[in-house]
Amino acid sequence: VADNRPIGVFDSGVGGLTVVRKAMEILPNESIIYLGDTARVPYGNKTPGLIRLYSQQCARFLLAHDVKLIVVACNTASAVALNTVQEISPVPVIGVITPAAKMALSHSPNGNIGIIGTRTTVRSKAYDADLWQMSEQRRLTVQAAACPLFVPLVEEGMEQHPATRAIAADYLRPFKESPVDVLILGCTHFPLLAEVIQQELPDTTLINSGEAAVSTALGVLNSINARRTATETPRRSFYVTDFPDTFPGIANRFLGVSGVHAEQVSIEELSTHHDHAHHD
Ligand code: DGL
Protein backbone atom coordinates (compact mmCIF):
# COMPACT_ATOMS: atom_id res chain seq x y z
CA VAL A 1 0.00 0.00 0.00
CA ALA A 2 1.28 3.45 -0.85
CA ASP A 3 0.06 6.96 -1.23
CA ASN A 4 2.00 9.12 -3.63
CA ARG A 5 -0.04 12.27 -3.07
CA PRO A 6 1.83 15.24 -1.60
CA ILE A 7 1.88 16.45 1.98
CA GLY A 8 0.37 19.94 2.32
CA VAL A 9 2.04 22.48 4.58
CA PHE A 10 0.74 25.97 5.27
CA ASP A 11 2.00 28.92 7.24
CA SER A 12 1.28 32.60 7.72
CA GLY A 13 4.28 33.43 5.53
CA VAL A 14 7.83 32.25 4.95
CA GLY A 15 8.48 30.94 8.48
CA GLY A 16 6.99 27.54 7.74
CA LEU A 17 9.92 26.88 5.44
CA THR A 18 11.86 25.90 8.60
CA VAL A 19 9.27 23.12 8.94
CA VAL A 20 9.63 22.12 5.27
CA ARG A 21 13.37 21.98 5.91
CA LYS A 22 12.78 19.40 8.66
CA ALA A 23 10.32 17.54 6.40
CA MET A 24 12.98 17.29 3.69
CA GLU A 25 15.34 15.75 6.27
CA ILE A 26 12.89 13.40 7.97
CA LEU A 27 10.65 12.56 4.98
CA PRO A 28 13.04 12.94 2.03
CA ASN A 29 10.92 10.82 -0.31
CA GLU A 30 7.68 12.78 0.17
CA SER A 31 6.30 15.37 -2.23
CA ILE A 32 5.32 18.65 -0.58
CA ILE A 33 2.99 21.54 -1.43
CA TYR A 34 3.65 24.65 0.63
CA LEU A 35 1.41 27.68 0.95
CA GLY A 36 2.71 30.81 2.69
CA ASP A 37 0.14 33.53 3.29
CA THR A 38 2.73 36.29 2.81
CA ALA A 39 0.02 38.84 1.93
CA ARG A 40 -1.52 38.61 5.37
CA VAL A 41 1.47 37.82 7.59
CA PRO A 42 1.87 38.20 10.56
CA TYR A 43 -0.82 36.04 12.14
CA GLY A 44 0.92 36.34 15.52
CA ASN A 45 -0.66 39.67 16.47
CA LYS A 46 -4.12 38.94 15.06
CA THR A 47 -7.22 37.71 16.87
CA PRO A 48 -8.24 34.03 16.80
CA GLY A 49 -11.37 34.56 14.68
CA LEU A 50 -9.44 36.06 11.79
CA ILE A 51 -6.71 33.43 12.03
CA ARG A 52 -9.36 30.68 11.85
CA LEU A 53 -10.81 32.19 8.67
CA TYR A 54 -7.38 32.52 7.02
CA SER A 55 -6.35 29.02 8.11
CA GLN A 56 -9.46 27.43 6.60
CA GLN A 57 -8.77 29.24 3.34
CA CYS A 58 -5.17 27.99 3.30
CA ALA A 59 -6.29 24.44 4.08
CA ARG A 60 -8.93 24.48 1.32
CA PHE A 61 -6.28 25.49 -1.19
CA LEU A 62 -4.13 22.52 -0.16
CA LEU A 63 -7.11 20.13 -0.19
CA ALA A 64 -7.94 21.23 -3.73
CA HIS A 65 -4.41 20.09 -4.61
CA ASP A 66 -5.24 16.61 -3.37
CA VAL A 67 -2.92 16.40 -0.37
CA LYS A 68 -2.90 13.28 1.81
CA LEU A 69 -2.10 15.09 5.05
CA ILE A 70 -1.89 18.70 6.22
CA VAL A 71 0.80 20.06 8.50
CA VAL A 72 -0.10 23.41 10.09
CA ALA A 73 3.45 24.78 10.28
CA CYS A 74 2.43 28.06 11.89
CA ASN A 75 2.44 27.90 15.68
CA THR A 76 -0.13 30.69 15.92
CA ALA A 77 -2.54 28.93 13.54
CA SER A 78 -1.93 25.61 15.31
CA ALA A 79 -2.68 27.26 18.65
CA VAL A 80 -6.03 28.80 17.72
CA ALA A 81 -7.26 27.17 14.48
CA LEU A 82 -6.32 23.48 14.49
CA ASN A 83 -9.88 22.26 15.22
CA THR A 84 -11.31 24.63 12.64
CA VAL A 85 -9.05 23.13 9.98
CA GLN A 86 -9.72 19.56 11.13
CA GLU A 87 -13.47 20.20 10.81
CA ILE A 88 -13.22 20.84 7.06
CA SER A 89 -10.50 18.31 6.25
CA PRO A 90 -11.10 14.77 5.06
CA VAL A 91 -7.37 14.04 5.57
CA PRO A 92 -5.38 14.09 8.84
CA VAL A 93 -4.32 17.54 10.07
CA ILE A 94 -1.25 17.85 12.29
CA GLY A 95 -0.40 21.00 14.20
CA VAL A 96 2.88 21.80 15.90
CA ILE A 97 1.59 22.29 19.46
CA THR A 98 0.79 18.75 20.67
CA PRO A 99 3.92 17.17 19.12
CA ALA A 100 6.17 19.87 20.61
CA ALA A 101 4.51 19.62 24.03
CA LYS A 102 5.02 15.86 24.00
CA MET A 103 8.67 16.23 22.99
CA ALA A 104 9.19 18.85 25.71
CA LEU A 105 7.79 16.53 28.40
CA SER A 106 10.02 13.68 27.29
CA HIS A 107 13.14 15.92 27.38
CA SER A 108 12.37 17.54 30.72
CA PRO A 109 13.86 15.74 33.72
CA ASN A 110 12.46 18.23 36.25
CA GLY A 111 9.19 19.31 34.65
CA ASN A 112 10.28 22.96 34.38
CA ILE A 113 9.09 23.92 30.92
CA GLY A 114 9.29 27.25 29.13
CA ILE A 115 7.44 28.38 26.02
CA ILE A 116 8.21 31.26 23.68
CA GLY A 117 6.03 32.29 20.77
CA THR A 118 3.97 35.08 19.28
CA ARG A 119 1.57 37.06 21.40
CA THR A 120 -1.47 35.15 20.14
CA THR A 121 0.19 31.76 20.71
CA VAL A 122 1.14 32.65 24.29
CA ARG A 123 -2.23 34.20 25.03
CA SER A 124 -4.05 31.10 23.73
CA LYS A 125 -2.39 28.91 26.38
CA ALA A 126 -2.60 26.03 23.91
CA TYR A 127 0.82 24.72 24.93
CA ASP A 128 -0.04 24.98 28.63
CA ALA A 129 -3.27 23.02 28.08
CA ASP A 130 -1.49 20.21 26.21
CA LEU A 131 1.37 20.04 28.70
CA TRP A 132 -0.99 19.75 31.65
CA GLN A 133 -3.14 17.22 29.86
CA MET A 134 -0.18 14.97 29.04
CA SER A 135 1.67 15.50 32.32
CA GLU A 136 0.33 12.31 33.93
CA GLN A 137 0.38 13.70 37.46
CA ARG A 138 3.99 14.84 37.14
CA ARG A 139 4.99 17.96 38.95
CA LEU A 140 5.12 20.68 36.30
CA THR A 141 5.96 24.37 36.18
CA VAL A 142 5.11 26.08 32.93
CA GLN A 143 6.05 29.63 32.05
CA ALA A 144 5.60 31.42 28.75
CA ALA A 145 6.90 34.62 27.20
CA ALA A 146 5.74 36.36 24.04
CA CYS A 147 8.69 37.35 21.82
CA PRO A 148 7.07 39.30 18.98
CA LEU A 149 10.19 41.20 17.88
CA PHE A 150 12.06 37.97 17.12
CA VAL A 151 9.97 37.48 13.96
CA PRO A 152 10.97 40.66 12.08
CA LEU A 153 14.56 40.44 13.38
CA VAL A 154 14.95 36.99 11.82
CA GLU A 155 13.28 38.09 8.58
CA GLU A 156 15.76 40.97 8.41
CA GLY A 157 18.64 38.50 8.78
CA MET A 158 19.69 40.07 12.09
CA GLU A 159 20.19 36.82 14.03
CA GLN A 160 23.69 37.80 15.15
CA HIS A 161 23.06 41.54 15.52
CA PRO A 162 23.78 43.13 18.93
CA ALA A 163 20.20 44.46 18.97
CA THR A 164 18.90 40.90 18.73
CA ARG A 165 21.16 39.80 21.58
CA ALA A 166 19.92 42.68 23.72
CA ILE A 167 16.27 41.87 22.99
CA ALA A 168 16.91 38.16 23.60
CA ALA A 169 18.49 38.95 26.98
CA ASP A 170 15.41 40.97 27.89
CA TYR A 171 12.77 38.51 26.60
CA LEU A 172 14.50 35.49 28.17
CA ARG A 173 15.14 37.05 31.58
CA PRO A 174 12.18 35.24 33.22
CA PHE A 175 13.78 31.90 32.27
CA LYS A 176 17.03 32.94 33.93
CA GLU A 177 15.30 34.08 37.08
CA SER A 178 13.43 30.80 37.39
CA PRO A 179 15.29 28.33 35.18
CA VAL A 180 13.61 25.88 32.82
CA ASP A 181 15.15 22.60 31.71
CA VAL A 182 13.45 22.75 28.31
CA LEU A 183 12.27 25.68 26.21
CA ILE A 184 9.76 25.17 23.39
CA LEU A 185 10.62 27.30 20.37
CA GLY A 186 6.93 27.88 19.69
CA CYS A 187 7.24 29.87 16.48
CA THR A 188 8.38 29.03 12.95
CA HIS A 189 11.13 31.64 13.00
CA PHE A 190 12.81 30.76 16.27
CA PRO A 191 15.00 27.82 15.14
CA LEU A 192 17.11 30.46 13.36
CA LEU A 193 17.73 32.06 16.76
CA ALA A 194 18.72 28.81 18.47
CA GLU A 195 22.34 29.92 18.85
CA VAL A 196 21.48 33.27 20.45
CA ILE A 197 18.86 31.69 22.72
CA GLN A 198 21.24 28.92 23.73
CA GLN A 199 23.88 31.49 24.67
CA GLU A 200 21.38 33.15 27.02
CA LEU A 201 20.20 29.81 28.45
CA PRO A 202 23.17 27.43 28.14
CA ASP A 203 21.68 24.71 30.38
CA THR A 204 18.28 24.57 28.67
CA THR A 205 17.29 22.04 26.00
CA LEU A 206 15.62 23.75 23.05
CA ILE A 207 12.65 22.06 21.35
CA ASN A 208 12.07 22.69 17.63
CA SER A 209 8.28 22.55 17.26
CA GLY A 210 8.46 22.00 13.50
CA GLU A 211 10.74 19.00 13.90
CA ALA A 212 8.34 17.54 16.46
CA ALA A 213 5.40 18.01 14.07
CA VAL A 214 7.22 16.36 11.16
CA SER A 215 8.13 13.36 13.35
CA THR A 216 4.47 13.04 14.26
CA ALA A 217 3.52 13.27 10.57
CA LEU A 218 5.93 10.40 9.86
CA GLY A 219 4.23 8.32 12.55
CA VAL A 220 0.76 9.07 11.16
CA LEU A 221 1.77 8.20 7.58
CA ASN A 222 3.26 4.91 8.80
CA SER A 223 0.18 4.06 10.83
CA ILE A 224 -2.14 4.52 7.83
CA ASN A 225 0.30 3.01 5.32
CA ALA A 226 0.46 6.24 3.38
CA ARG A 227 4.20 6.71 2.75
CA ARG A 228 5.18 7.63 -0.79
CA THR A 229 6.81 4.78 -2.67
CA ALA A 230 7.32 6.31 -6.12
CA THR A 231 10.95 6.24 -7.17
CA GLU A 232 11.03 9.50 -9.18
CA THR A 233 12.30 12.57 -7.34
CA PRO A 234 9.58 13.96 -5.07
CA ARG A 235 7.97 17.24 -6.16
CA ARG A 236 8.16 20.30 -3.95
CA SER A 237 5.92 23.21 -4.91
CA PHE A 238 5.80 26.57 -3.17
CA TYR A 239 2.94 29.04 -3.32
CA VAL A 240 2.71 32.49 -1.73
CA THR A 241 -0.12 35.02 -1.58
CA ASP A 242 2.25 37.94 -2.23
CA PHE A 243 5.79 38.32 -3.52
CA PRO A 244 7.67 40.77 -1.31
CA ASP A 245 11.11 41.47 -2.80
CA THR A 246 12.68 40.00 0.33
CA PHE A 247 11.15 36.59 -0.45
CA PRO A 248 13.99 34.82 -2.32
CA GLY A 249 16.65 35.69 0.27
CA ILE A 250 14.47 34.79 3.22
CA ALA A 251 13.32 31.56 1.59
CA ASN A 252 16.89 30.44 0.97
CA ARG A 253 17.92 31.11 4.56
CA PHE A 254 14.88 29.44 6.11
CA LEU A 255 14.92 26.40 3.85
CA GLY A 256 18.68 26.02 3.75
CA VAL A 257 18.74 25.58 -0.03
CA SER A 258 18.96 28.26 -2.68
CA GLY A 259 16.93 28.99 -5.78
CA VAL A 260 13.49 28.40 -4.26
CA HIS A 261 10.89 29.06 -6.92
CA ALA A 262 7.43 30.12 -5.75
CA GLU A 263 4.19 30.80 -7.58
CA GLN A 264 1.68 33.40 -6.57
CA VAL A 265 -1.91 32.60 -5.69
CA SER A 266 -4.06 35.68 -5.19
CA ILE A 267 -6.01 36.38 -2.02
CA GLU A 268 -9.20 36.58 -4.15
CA GLU A 269 -8.53 33.07 -5.39
CA LEU A 270 -7.81 31.87 -1.87
CA SER A 271 -10.96 33.41 -0.40
CA THR A 272 -13.24 31.97 -3.07
CA HIS A 273 -11.62 28.56 -2.93
CA HIS A 274 -14.13 25.85 -2.18
CA ASP A 275 -12.64 22.44 -1.81
CA HIS A 276 -13.61 19.95 -4.52
CA ALA A 277 -12.26 17.20 -2.31
CA HIS A 278 -14.95 17.53 0.30
CA HIS A 279 -18.46 17.68 -1.14
CA ASP A 280 -20.60 14.86 0.16
N1 DGL B 1 4.35 31.63 11.64
C1 DGL B 1 4.10 32.36 12.86
C2 DGL B 1 4.19 31.39 14.05
O1 DGL B 1 4.82 30.35 13.96
C3 DGL B 1 5.08 33.51 13.05
C4 DGL B 1 4.85 34.65 12.08
C5 DGL B 1 3.49 35.29 12.26
O2 DGL B 1 3.24 35.96 13.28
O3 DGL B 1 2.67 35.11 11.37
O4 DGL B 1 3.62 31.66 15.08
Image (spheres, rainbow, N blue to C red):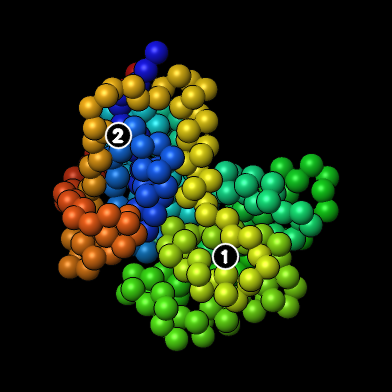
- Depicted 94 relative to depicted 261: above or below: above
Label 1 crowd (10 A; few <14 / some 14-19 / many >=20): many
Position of the C terminus by quadrant: top left
Left or right? Give the position of 53 relative to 137. left
Q: Position of residue 28 (x, y in %)?
A: 36, 37
Q: Residue at x 46, y 80 (%)?
A: 164
- The local secondary structure at tag 2 comes to loop
Q: Position of residue 236 (x, y in %)?
A: 25, 40
Q: Position of residue 244 (x, y in %)?
A: 20, 65
The disc at residue 116 is: 1
Circle nearer the N terminus (2, 1):
2
The disc at residue 227 is: none
Check disc 2 and report the residue beneath it.
31
In front here: 25 or 225? 25
- The local secondary structure at tag 1 comes to strand
Q: Residue at x 43, y 53 (%)?
A: 74
In front here: 195 or 55? 195
